[in-house]
Amino acid sequence: MMARSGFRLFRIAGISIYLDWSLLFIFWLVIWQLAAGVFPFWHPDWGPGLAWGVAIVAAILFFASILAHEMAHSLVAKAKGLPVRRITLFMFGGVSNIEQEPPSAGTEFLVAIVGPITSIVLGVIFSILGGLLVGNVGTAITSPREILAHAGPLATLLFWLGPINILLGVFNLIPGFPLDGGRVLRSILWGITHNLTQATRWAATVGQIVAWLLIVSGIAMVFGVRIPFFGTGLIGGLWLAFIGWFLNNAAIASYQQVVVQDILEGVPVARLMRSDVHGVPPDISVSSLVYDHLMGTDERAFPVVEGDNLVGLVTLDDVRRVPRDAWDVTSVRQIMTPADQLEVVQPREDTSDALLKLARRDIGQMPVVENGHLVGILRLRDIMRWLQLHSDGLLGT
């Protein structure tokens, strides 16, 4: 199943696992770095075939470890009653799409901390297994270089996976929201202040500070400055700065998301919906839909109704899929999305929940239905207008 930026691999425990196209670049970069640099340095006697083969397996297991990290987040979230529909693996690792904020600081802490713990535990296990394999060689080993020199392909693989997973876990504990460490920090602040919005603002501010430290450090590395732990160099510096830029944007977006939910919470859909719905009958032609309804209006979607009963929704995109010379012989019923396939909302439903539905389906409007009857339509642009009127500058950090 294709996604906007990648494709679905499989499902685990009811959670769809998606792979973003950007991951393919990082996958190749990891393989190339291991096969052309790390493994030949550790094992000069290895041929290209062995080095590349072990590198491919290492990259696959590394991203499987990232998936285990995200699955830990998702399974704990589901156990706490939070909906999780998908996990996306992308160039910076992975992200669990937990569709709503945790109900309490304690839940936030558990969901956040379990990912880094999983990575660190995996790293320790891989390192111990690698050590056991080398120990079976029976050779006197006096230095880390000798350990690597006596390590076979499997032990080498484990010795690389161990530290890299520990590093992944420790990096995620950096208090840079929305990294796991930032969410742990937010859960602590939330528990102290009992105010999710304020806690998110403070955690996001710390996240932006961390992000700018990474950006500045990355730029310094580009100009030859050696940064402790990260080293120096053009490629490493650009990569670190890019990570900082991404983290800064993510911190801002995460705070804005919480502010949006805070503004919309308790606002019923009925307050923002358009009750003067312009519906169309299902048996008119596409030509009639275009010239009698679409033209002269800024609406991009129309409920399809019989009386006041909703039977479907037809959009401008549906019309575009019909060849121009078939407009007169094609009915709206033939191109509409039937009512039983639509995402709908109730008039008394929270607009914050409705916005999640719109985002989940990537749509711009939803019919508002009560007892099977169409009573209005909720448009994303009307929600955005409400937010602009009531944000009071809170959507900027």
Image: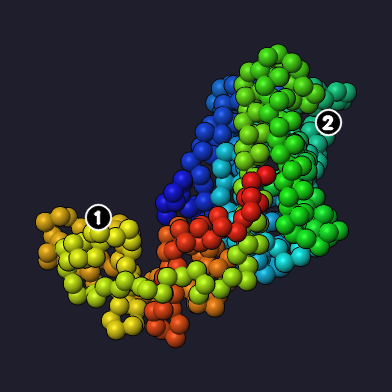
Name the spot of residue 195 as percent of width and height, x first. Answer: 78, 60
**Comes first in the chain, label 2 or label 1:** 2
Q: Quadrant of residue 85?
A: bottom right
Query: Which residue appears at 56% of the width and 73% of the height?
Result: 268
Query: Which residue appears at 52% of the width and 72% of the height?
Result: 271
Per the image, label 1 sits on a secondary structure element best described as helix
- Report the residue marked by disc 2: 138
Name the spot of residue 126 as percent of width and height, x first. Answer: 75, 42
Name the spot of residue 313 as percent of width and height, x first. Answer: 33, 69
Q: CA distance from mark 2 to mark 1?
A: 72 Å
Residue 393 placement, left or right of 174: left
- Report the residue marked by disc 1: 320
Query: Which residue appears at 69% of the width and 47% of the height?
Result: 178
Per the image, label 2 sits on a secondary structure element best described as loop
- Quadrant where the N terminus sits is bottom left
- Residue closest to the eye, 233 or 375: 375
- Residue closest to the eye, 290 or 150: 290
Q: Is residue 215 above or below residue 18?
A: above
Is residue 40 in sight in this rendering? Answer: no
- Quadrant where the C terminus sits is top right
